[in-house]
Image (cartoon, helix red, strand yellow):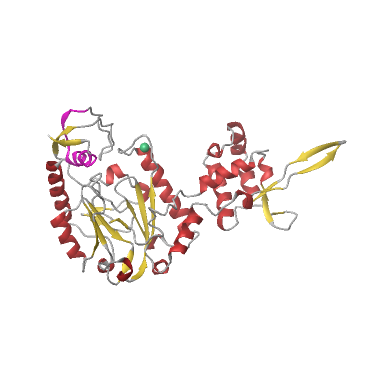
């Protein structure tokens, strides 16, 4: 791979020749560079300003460039405490779960993780934490996901435990179905027999926090005719679509339980026994799946380094491109809004010129930058591909220069 690595380094260096880092306070950040073996081989690096960083990237063209969400007085000092932590951006790292597409991430995986990222911003960060989209940047990770960086002063001083609590709120680890749904079903005597009268009280769509969130999610799935995602049978779902307005009204009409608390009478939806299971599915559907795994968590472990936005990811040759519409450009090309961001279209940054490569492992049909699909290729094939695709295949270890 030595020849390929030289070629890739040359391409990456050309990329960095005209490049500007889209981050603030370069002088207060710690940087880490990777090599072809390890994503972070060197850390505790610091640069006095953006041009010093650019000059170094132009010279070394590392396959991976990471930086700290944290701001330090002495970013190159070690051990960590002597850096003197001054605060950190609030970061969320969303990665597509493993799927049969493996290393050639498919459109379906990219779409799913983009929707999770939009949900994190629109359903949690903006309404529940009062953050504005102007305070955030979002970038494609260069691999299988997205990073959301909240940069406002209001989050910089948050400590580890507070950051962890935010994640636990968003991924529903502090939410219990028991607290949301009350089974007040009772037995009554009817013509000499004991008859069960089901009564399920649950959140109002006007409630705050997680209560209102799940009720509103139900209404959204109802409007989008997606109730089957909650395990509701097709016939029952159809029936609810036909009386959508009535169901919506039910969930915003206050009724009082025996204890005096205000709820919505979910019994009126007529789901009979399935409420517990349906609410479990509803919570799953509402939450954003962010892991609280301590080993890899960039949200609460602010000493972790993460991909520098707009830098090249050596595992794909893609740019970890910014994906929000803050007026940012990359070499004059406007940054697409997250909703419109397509990794296969917007993240390849190299040319369309023909590059001759030899395929060394089977390659599936892949989405191309122009919106088309490439052909699948068998091992040993030698062919000409656009340079950006050739670079992607070499970074994936699936092709060599021919
Ligand atoms: Zn996939």
- Image point 82% across, 38% down: which residue? 194
Q: Looking at the image, can residue 17 be seen?
A: no
Percent position (x, y) of residue 42?
23, 57
Position of 235 compared to 73: left or right? right
Snapshot quadrant of residue 101: top left
Q: In which quadrant of the rendered view does residue 356 lie? A: top left
Q: Nearer the viewer, residue 147 or 121?
A: 147
Decide: is 340 above or below 382: below
Above or below, 380 relative to 284: above
Which residue is located at x 29 percent, y 72 percent?
Answer: 73
Left or right? Give the position of 18 relative to 259. left
**Ligand 1 sits in which quadrant?**
top left
Give the quarter of the image for residue 363. top left
Say whether residue 62 is left or right of residue 298: left
Decide if residue 350 is on the left or right side of residue 234: left
Say which quadrant the N terminus sits in.
top left
**Bounds of the magenta span?**
379-396
Q: Quadrant of the C terminus?
A: top left
- State yes or no: residue 387 in magenta: yes
Residue 292 spot, x, y in % from top left: 45, 53
């Amino acid at each position: 791979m030595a020849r390929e690595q030289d070629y890739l380094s040359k391409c990456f260096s050309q990329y960095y020749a005209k490049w500007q880092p889209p981050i603030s306070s370069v002088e207060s950040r710690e940087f880490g560079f990777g090599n072809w073996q390890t994503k972070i081989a060197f850390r505790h690096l610091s640069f006095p300003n953006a041009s010093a960083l650019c000059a170094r990237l132009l010279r070394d063209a590392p396959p991976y460039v990471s930086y700290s969400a944290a701001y330090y007085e002495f970013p190159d000092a070690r051990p960590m405490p002597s850096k003197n932590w001054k605060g950190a951006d609030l970061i969320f790292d969303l990665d597509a779960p493993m799927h049969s597409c493996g290393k050639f991430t498919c459109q379906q995986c990219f779409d799913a993780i983009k929707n999770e990222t939009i949900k994190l911003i629109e359903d949690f960060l903006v309404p529940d934490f009062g953050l504005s989209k102007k305070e955030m940047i979002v970038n494609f990770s260069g691999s299988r996901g997205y990073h959301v960086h909240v940069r406002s002063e209001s989050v910089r001083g948050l400590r580890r435990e507070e950051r962890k609590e935010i994640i636990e709120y968003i991924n529903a680890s502090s939410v219990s179905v028991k607290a949301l749904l009350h089974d007040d079903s009772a037995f009554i005597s009817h013509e000499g027999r004991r008859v069960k009268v089901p009564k399920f009280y649950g959140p109002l769509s006007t409630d705050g926090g997680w209560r209102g969130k799940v009720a509103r999610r139900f209404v959204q799935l109802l409007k989008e005719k997606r109730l089957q995602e909650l395990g509701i049978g097709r016939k029952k779902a159809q029936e609810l679509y036909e009386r959508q307005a009535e169901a919506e009204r039910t969930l915003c009409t206050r009724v009082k339980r025996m204890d005096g608390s205000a709820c919505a009478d979910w019994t009126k939806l007529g789901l009979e026994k399935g409420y517990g299971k349906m609410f479990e599915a509803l919570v799953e559907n509402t939450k954003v799946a962010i892991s609280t795994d301590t080993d890899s968590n960039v949200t609460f472990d602010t000493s972790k380094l993460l991909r520098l936005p707009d830098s090249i990811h050596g595992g794909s040759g893609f740019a970890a491109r910014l994906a929000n519409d803050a007026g940012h450009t990359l070499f004059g090309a406007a940054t697409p809004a997250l909703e419109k961001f397509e990794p296969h279209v917007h993240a390849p940054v190299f040319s369309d010129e023909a590059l001759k490569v030899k395929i060394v492992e089977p390659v599936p049909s892949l989405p191309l930058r122009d919106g088309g699909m490439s052909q699948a290729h068998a091992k040993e094939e030698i062919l000409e591909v656009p340079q950006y695709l050739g670079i992607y295949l070499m970074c994936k270890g699936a092709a060599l220069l021919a």
